[in-house]
């Protein structure tokens, strides 16, 4: 069955339905001190992650999300301890980070940071934020399939119809930044990539 989105507490989440359990287990494993999210979108997945953190005893985990257009759902997110920022931190061509002060100090705070790249250009988001990570931090990107060949064979018209980032897009950055795959057996089926800085 091809998926494109589900709903969480009435809010749209553009995720494979199995992503919820995968992320719940992941968050329980890594217990992040903070989350930086690029791409709030409908807010459903953001609210789920916030609720999962609370349920796991991680209510003090800071959650900062960025999007470029306000949505009605964001008021609910803000009421639930998510800092939603309506701002583009990238340049007008979406090729480089323009507002480092909005993200770098946050990432560099003590404790593990989890970065979720799910905005308008996952390749730029991953490749420009990855160098800001400190050891033991994590970075992820959505709509990821290892290669376009795998996407066409196993995902398109079967599971998921979007492939916005592939391993070839982030291979060099991963090598330069010391990023290694984490939990890809779980994340690959729900079209996410996860890497940790070692």
Image (cartoon, rainbow, N blue to C red):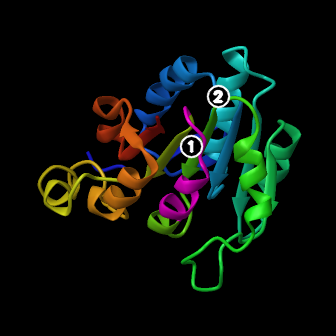
- The residue at the point 56 percent across, 23 percent down is 30
Pointer 2: residues within 10 angstroms few (<14), some, or many (20+)?
many
Q: Quarter of the image holding residue 62?
A: top right
> Residue 157, image x and y in percent?
21, 57
Give the residues drawn in magenta, as a range. 125-136
Q: Quarter of the image holding residue 99?
A: bottom right
Q: Is residue 19 visible?
A: yes
Q: Nearer the viewer, residue 158 or 167?
A: 167
Pointer 1: residues within 10 angstroms few (<14), some, or many (20+)?
some
Q: Nearer the viewer, residue 52 or 95?
A: 95
Q: Which residue is mark 2?
A: 32
Magenta span dominant secondary structure: helix
Marks 1 and 2, how far apart at CA? 24 Å
- The residue at the point 33 percent across, 64 percent down is 169
> Residue 160, image x and y in percent?
31, 53
Tell me if 70 is positioned left or right of 122 in this view.
right
Tell me if 64 is positioned left or right of 198 in this view.
right
> Residue 47, image x and y in percent?
69, 39
As drawn, the label of residue 7 is 1
């Amino acid at each position: 069955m091809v998926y494109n989105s589900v709903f969480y507490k009435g809010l749209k989440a553009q995720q494979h339905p199995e992503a919820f359990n995968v992320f719940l287990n992941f968050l329980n494993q890594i217990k992040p001190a903070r989350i930086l999210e690029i791409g709030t979108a409908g807010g459903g997945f953001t609210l789920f992650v916030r609720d999962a953190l609370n349920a796991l005893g991680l209510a003090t985990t800071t959650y900062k999300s960025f999007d470029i257009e306000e949505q009605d759902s964001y008021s609910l997110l803000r009421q639930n301890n998510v800092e939603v920022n309506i701002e583009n931190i990238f340049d007008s061509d979406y090729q480089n980070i323009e507002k480092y002060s909005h993200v770098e100090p946050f990432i560099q705070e003590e404790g593990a940071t989890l970065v979720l790249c799910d905005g308008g250009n996952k390749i730029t988001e991953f490749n420009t934020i990855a160098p800001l990570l400190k050891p033991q931090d994590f970075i992820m990107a959505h709509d990821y399939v290892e290669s376009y060949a795998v996407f066409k064979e196993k995902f398109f018209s079967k599971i998921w119809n979007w492939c916005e980032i592939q391993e070839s897009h982030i291979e060099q950055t991963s090598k330069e930044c010391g990023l290694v795959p984490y939990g890809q057996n779980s994340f690959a089926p729900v079209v996410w990539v996860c890497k940790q800085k070692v």
